[in-house]
Image: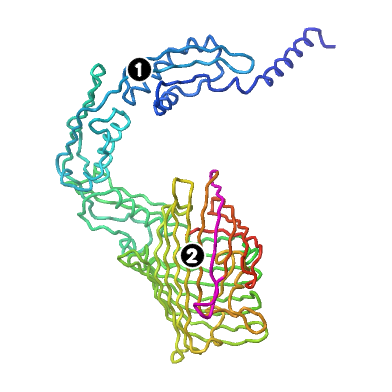
């Protein structure tokens, strides 16, 4: 039997638990309020930041804490140049609804102003224009003293010296003199840089397995050039992006320098030779799809690679293989041999395509990527029940592209340009004469962080001796989530007598989109698309418009669009489009 004391104790425990659950959330709200006389939001914010969160305190505890809060608020104002503030405080009593509050009322007074600024760079850095350019302009003479701006100026000089190889540099004088009574500040920063260090020979530690000549092609600087951390960072980045290594350690420390020349030592750990990846996806153009790839990251000490890829969906199935030989420089230049098979069945167009080819990729001095190619294509096709054929084409081609984005996953600004031209002639292993041109331009710009504007223009043209002999893979079709939304995938094109889309000689597509970010990683979009695949540049174009939702997932943007095709004669109507992938 339980004793009466045990019953009472249990009841008290239950009552205490209920009281704890009943305590209102407002009891844990911020209990210090800062009020600054005048329009000084930055002073208010800095004082609040110095004081921090104060919660769960009693009225008497706030009285004891008041002197600490006053000191912290004073430090916050001094950091922004206000050395003589008048700070008063009071504690407002709390009640059942609101906790007690400590209120600081601040009259900031007159600020300290900078009356002189001396920044003197001596030594070799004085004639180094990149060192001297764009040093912080503030605090300048006449400015209200801001200790953060002064620290930024001082730290920028030191960081730039380390970045550019002035490892013997030091401040001869580094003073900030403040007279609170006269409210003046004097800044003096005199930096003696010494001589600039240089980068020496790059050596690769044993055990990497690859040919040394291949690794040396990753080095883009000559021995003896002035030191810059960007050169070391680029070497590290290029070796990492090669896909050959699981570990990279670059040693280029000033303490090993001889006559201010720093030797560069690189230790590499070879990665596992093979990897396999698989994934599933969905878009309204092709429905569910499966993608898989197998890659051999290195085959021999020369750095050759090979791999195979496949994509399976209801309308399209393909498999391809490639073999790659790195050139100099291996970061951008290569030769790739390819072979592939593809089967498509889209909107009454069936085709089977077999390809063999070779590509030479080279980055030009202008930054454009050039791809020169030769490929053979054999295609068997059936368009509706009216047009069947086979084609054999030898297609030399050239492509030029340039991509800039300030972020790989979710850029805020950037552009992409692409231009491709291929051709075939009946005198050279081809059943029809063809000249095929395709150009694409995309742009992205963000204003005020939340307002994004995207534009896209695509133009294509096909010249041929006999259009009926051109296979569907080289004709132009429009419509779908990557083209003109509000219309079915590849349904926009000239039609035959039975109303079957047969593809066009020209492609004209333009798109404008506005996005507004309303939450982290979420955006809404408004868009208009206009275009068509046509046989005459003066033929009418189709228009689609709609709204969308964007989610920036860890693997890239996911897009859900509700679009209305505005031209019923082209099959326009309400359509939902879902897609994923980069916006540039």
Badge number at residue 93: none
Separation (CA) of disc 2 from disc 1: 69 Å
Say if 159 sits above or below 76 in the image. Answer: below
In the picture, measured across the screen, residue 227 lies left or right of residue 87, that is left
Q: Are marks 2 and 1 in contact (CB under 8 Å)?
A: no
Neighbor class of circle 2 (other Cα within 10 Å; few <14, some 14-19, many 20+) is: some
Quadrant containing the N terminus in the rendered view: top right
Say whether residue 197 is magenta: no
Question: Judging from the image, what secondary structure is the residue with disc 2 in?
Answer: strand
Q: In the rendering, at what x and y percent does residue 199 appear?
A: 23, 51
Q: Residue at x 39, y 16 (%)?
A: 71
Q: Residue at x 55, y 43 (%)?
A: 519
Neighbor class of circle 1 (other Cα within 10 Å; few <14, some 14-19, many 20+) is: some
Say if 350 sits above or below 22 in the image. Answer: below
In the picture, measured across the screen, residue 499 lies left or right of residue 32, that is right
Q: Residue at x 31, y 63 (%)?
A: 217
Q: Which residue is mark 2?
A: 296
Q: Which residue is mark 1?
A: 85
Q: Main secondary structure of the magenta part?
A: strand
Residue furthest out toward the right: 1
Say if 471 sits above or below 198 in the image. Answer: below
Residue nearest the viewer, comparing 48 with 162:
48
The magenta region covers 519-541
Question: Judging from the image, what secondary structure is the residue with disc 1 in?
Answer: loop
Q: In the rendering, at what x and y percent does residue 292 appear?
A: 58, 64
In the picture, measured across the screen, residue 36 lies left or right of residue 552, that is left
């Amino acid at each position: 039997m339980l004793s009466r004391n045990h019953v009472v104790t249990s009841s008290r425990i239950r009552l205490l638990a209920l009281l704890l659950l009943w305590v209102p959330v407002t009891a844990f709200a911020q209990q210090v309020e800062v009020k600054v006389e005048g329009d000084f939001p930055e002073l208010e914010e800095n004082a609040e930041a110095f004081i921090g969160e104060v919660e769960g305190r009693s009225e008497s505890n706030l009285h004891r804490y008041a002197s600490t809060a006053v000191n912290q608020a004073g430090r916050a104002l001094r950091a922004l140049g206000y050395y003589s503030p008048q700070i008063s405080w009071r504690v407002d009593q709390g009640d059942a609804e609101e906790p007690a509050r400590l209120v600081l009322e601040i009259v900031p007074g007159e600020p300290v102003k900078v009356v002189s600024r001396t920044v003197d760079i001596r030594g070799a850095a004085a004639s180094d224009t990149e060192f001297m350019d764009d040093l912080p302009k503030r605090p300048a003479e006449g400015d209200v003293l801001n200790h953060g701006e002064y620290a930024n100026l001082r730290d920028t000089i030191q960081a730039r010296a380390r970045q550019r190889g002035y490892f013997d540099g030091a401040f001869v004088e580094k003073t900030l003199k403040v007279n609170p009574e006269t409210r003046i500040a004097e800044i003096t920063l005199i930096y003696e840089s010494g001589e600039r260090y240089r980068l020496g020979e790059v050596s690769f530690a044993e055990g990497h397995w690859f040919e040394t000549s291949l690794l040396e092609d990753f080095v883009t600087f000559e021995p003896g050039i002035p030191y810059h951390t960007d050169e070391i960072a680029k070497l590290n980045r290029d070796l990492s992006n090669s896909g050959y290594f699981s570990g990279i350690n670059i040693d280029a420390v000033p303490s090993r320098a001889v006559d201010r020349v720093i030797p560069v030592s690189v230790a590499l750990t070879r990665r596992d030779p093979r990897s396999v990846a698989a994934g599933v996806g969905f878009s309204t153009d092709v429905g569910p799809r499966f993608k898989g790839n197998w890659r051999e990251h290195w085959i021999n000490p020369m750095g050759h690679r090979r791999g195979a890829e496949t994509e399976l969906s209801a309308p399209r199935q393909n498999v391809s293989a490639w073999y790659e030989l790195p050139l100099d420089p291996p970061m951008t230049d290569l030769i790739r041999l390819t072979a592939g098979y593809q089967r498509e069945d889209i909107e009454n167009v069936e085709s089977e395509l077999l390809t063999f080819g070779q590509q030479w990729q080279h980055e030009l001095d202008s930054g454009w990527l050039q791809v020169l190619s030769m490929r053979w294509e054999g295609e068997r096709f059936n368009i509706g029940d009216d047009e069947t054929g086979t084609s054999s084409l030898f297609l030399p081609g050239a492509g030029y592209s340039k991509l800039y984005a300030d972020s790989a996953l979710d850029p805020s600004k950037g552009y992409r340009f692409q231009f491709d031209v291929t051709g075939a002639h009946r005198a050279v292993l081809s059943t029809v004469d063809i000249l095929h041109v395709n150009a694409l331009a995309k742009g992205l710009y963000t204003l005020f962080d939340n307002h994004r504007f995207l534009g896209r223009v695509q133009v294509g043209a096909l010249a041929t001796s006999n259009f009926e002999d051109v296979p569907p893979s080289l004709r132009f079709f429009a419509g779908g989530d990557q083209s003109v939304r509000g219309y079915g995938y590849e349904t926009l094109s000239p039609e035959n007598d039975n109303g079957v889309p047969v593809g066009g000689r020209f492609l004209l597509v333009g798109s404008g989109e506005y996005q507004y970010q309303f939450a982290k990683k979420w955006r809404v979009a408004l868009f208009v698309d206009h275009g068509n695949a046509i046989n005459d540049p003066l033929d009418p174009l189709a228009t689609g418009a709609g709204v969308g939702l964007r989610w920036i997932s860890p693997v890239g943007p996911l897009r859900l669009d509700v679009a209305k095709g505005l031209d019923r004669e082209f099959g326009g109507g309400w359509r939902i489009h879902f897609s994923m992938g980069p916006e540039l």
